[in-house]
Amino acid sequence: MINQDDRSYAPPLMMPSEKADLLDKIQPTKIINTIFHRLMGEVYTGDGWVKDEQLSSRALTKKGAWDIITIMIPVSSQNVSLSKLKDHEIRARALSIAKTTQEMCLRNWKEYGIKGADQLRFIHEIVFSNTFITLKQPEGEGIRNMIKNIGSGEIGFQPQEEQSPGWNTFRR
């Protein structure tokens, strides 16, 4: 009889062609499309994006939303997912992109449909947060190393430890 604690699990083997499949699944540009529509005051209904009249006073013009997402696209790509930037480089790049966006918004506020200073801060937070998080994801080359090791059998795998039976039980 085999004791359950003595069994070890082998990592699932991935073929080199699966590297391409994994790369296809890394799609940081998906959020860009969502940000674009939301900046224009649109909501997703399941059938597509629809203008919400309650958001019209906060919505940017299509040109404003387009310019804002366009500046984020270069850092929201598969290439960035495979980069190996350092923390100080990530922070500097995210801040630079956010500052450039602020300058664009100030210069083109009428064209962009900006109606108040609060919108400027809101846009800054969206751009900085998305850029920073996107650039932080590949920190330490995690994704890069994982893809590099696919098919070589070097992908780390650790089975989850079993929880003790009373772990989630509440006591009176």
Image (cartoon, rainbow, N blue to C red):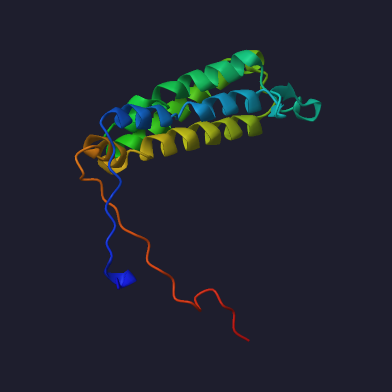
Q: Is residue 141 above or below residue 101?
A: below
Q: Is residue 165 above or below residue 137?
A: below
Is 82 or 100 nearer to us in this picture? 82
The percent position of residue 5, horizontal first and vertical second, equals: 31, 71
Is 55 or 81 nearer to us in this picture? 81
**From this viewpoint, which residue is outermost toward the right?**
53
- Residue at image coords 37%, 26%: 78
The percent position of residue 48, horizontal first and vertical second, equals: 69, 23
Quarter of the image holding residue 114? Answer: top right
Quarter of the image holding residue 9? Answer: bottom left
Q: Is residue 48 above or below residue 130?
A: above
- 36 vs 19, left or right, is right
**From this viewpoint, which residue is outermost toward the front?**
1
Is 136 or 108 nearer to us in this picture? 136
- Residue at image coords 54%, 73%: 168
- Residue at image coords 30%, 73%: 1
**From this viewpoint, which residue is outermost toward the bottom?**
172
The percent position of residue 92, horizontal first and vertical second, equals: 35, 34
Is 167 or 144 nearer to us in this picture? 167
- Residue at image coords 44%, 71%: 163
- Could you tell me if residue 87 is visible in this image? no
The quadrant of the picture occupied by the C terminus is bottom right
The percent position of residue 146, horizontal first and vertical second, equals: 27, 40
- 32 vs 49, left or right, is left
- Could you tell me if residue 40 is visible in this image? yes
How many numbered badges does the structure rendering display?
Answer: 0
Quarter of the image holding residue 108? Answer: top right
